[in-house]
Image: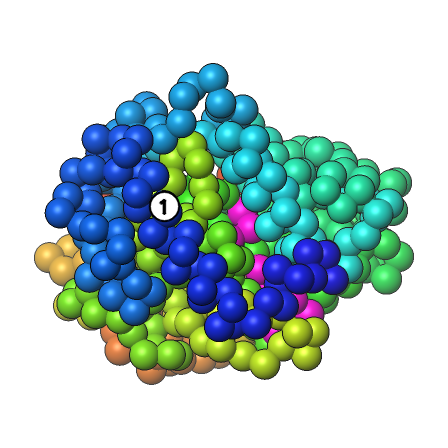
Amino acid sequence: MFDHAAQTQPVEERRTDQQRLLRTLIDRVKDASPQHRAQLRGIDSSDVTLDNLHELPSVRKQDLREFYPLNSLCVDRSQLRRIHATSGTSGKPTIVAYTDHDMAVLRRTNARALDASGVIAGTMVHNAYGYGLFTGGLGLHAGIEELKACCLPISGGNTARQAAMIQDLRSEVLLCTPSYAAVIADLFAAQGVDPADIALRAGILGAEPWSEGMREKVEAGLGITALDIYGLCEVQGPGVGFETVNSGGHLFVNEDEFLVECIDPVSGKPCAEGEVGELVFTTLTKEAVPVVRYRTGDLASLQRVNDPEGRTFVTMSRILGRADDMLVIRGVNVFPSEIEAVLLADARVATAYTLVIDERGTMPSLVAVTEPVAGIDRSALDTMLEGLQRQLKERLGVSCKVVFAEPGGLPRTEVGKAVRVQRWKPNAESPFPGVLA
Ligand code: DLL
């Protein structure tokens, strides 16, 4: 196992290290930046323990945006080696920066994720995460180099070329978002390529929520074992948490670097083990732009599991949704991921879908626009739609109409994260003319 000592360090020993690093971090950031001094005013690091950490003030994305571009920097600019950023939805991006040390952590933690899927020196890795300001491409690239594997830095887009390169170079491991893996699988299916004839054996898929149904479809379509990887630019980028073949769907959190808490999003109280809440991260050793108690908005649960390979990191569940992705339909809270879970659990439903919130009436209503897989008998479609609508009603507690486009008829996201929700405003054209009237 790559980085064996760190990954299998006894829990109590790691807690002692985390406690020490936490106190040093608090002193360090208070010394270095007025923003952190404001956040941690009146707090004496020697009073802070892993057990009372949840009582410290937290920060959120909007707080970090106010530090734009680099106002909460904790090192001299001469020590910066890399900048990344997320586009953000409301204008200003969030900018993050890395020192030599931060780059080393990025390399090491991503190498752990790649190693868990069997990447070794010389493995041909097809990296279709976006390169550039997004952390995905270059973040995983760093891990690939750390393991001395061979990287094809293809980035996103031009799916026909992606498919050809996977075949021609006999790529073994695919890195991209789950929705893009599904797009590549759809193209192979349309070209009549048998997954058994391509060399891919694993996929490390993340950066957006995905369901068990999506996993099954991508695994079948590409002939791979699909593993989840989690991360966010405010904490580092990819490599914060990673699934392994034996982790039973849980993701190990690299908690020697990223201290994780799970809290009730309303009361802020710590959740019990296994209880779903909001993940909060503290970067224990990060130099350039550390965060103390960053509230991610991501909902998941934390659990200690017994790893047959000996990892002792705490695990997180897959992300169940984001607090701000929640839709309120007729007073009922709905997460898009719940709808995906129902739709994609059906083998006859394809992986492309968009949720439309129809806001033209007095009350908003929900429509899932999706496709049947190719070759389904048309006479079976009505029964299929009824079945899906019934299951959605049962799961969500509110109606969700389902409509089918022709197989392959919906637009696919080839670059960046899939956008799954669209609003249909009064007097606007249908977002899917010919499919949704
Ligand atoms: O998406 C970093 C990344 C790159 C992760 C490549 C994995 C692979 P951001 O653009 O800052 O960073 O977006 C972070 O994406 O707060 C989650 O809401 C979501 N997200 C990331 N990974 C997952 C995942 C990268 N595995 C935001 N499952 C996070 C569900 C995820 N959501």
What segment carries the magenta color?
Answer: 238-247
Please tell me how crowded label 1 is: few (under 14), some (14-19), or many (20+) other residues with Cα within 10 Å: many
Give, as a three-letter code, the residue at label 1.
Answer: Leu
Horizontal and vertical percent position of residue 286: 45, 41
Horizontal and vertical percent position of residue 424: 27, 47
Q: Nearer the viewer, residue 428 or 269?
A: 269
For the stretch drawn in magenta, the main secondary structure is: strand
Name, please, the residue furthest toward the front.
Answer: 46
Which quadrant of the structure image shows residue 28? Answer: top left
Which quadrant of the structure image shows residue 4? Answer: bottom right
Colour setup of the view: rainbow
Above or below for 164 versus 172 = above
The residue at which mark 1 appears reads as 25
In the image, 310: left or right of 274?
right
Regarding residue 67, the answer to whether it shows in the image is yes
Horizontal and vertical percent position of residue 399: 28, 72
In the image, 392: left or right of 331?
right
* Residue drawn 55% across the image and 36% down it: 101
* Residue drawn 42% across the image and 32% down it: 288
Q: Is mark 1 within 8 Å of ligand 1?
A: no
* Residue drawn 32% across the image and 23% down it: 69
Q: Nearer the viewer, residue 84 or 330?
A: 84
Q: Is residue 256 magenta?
A: no
Label 1 residue SS: helix
Horizontal and vertical percent position of residue 149: 80, 44
Q: Nearer the viewer, residue 355 or 215?
A: 215
Name, please, the residue furthest toward the top.
Answer: 78
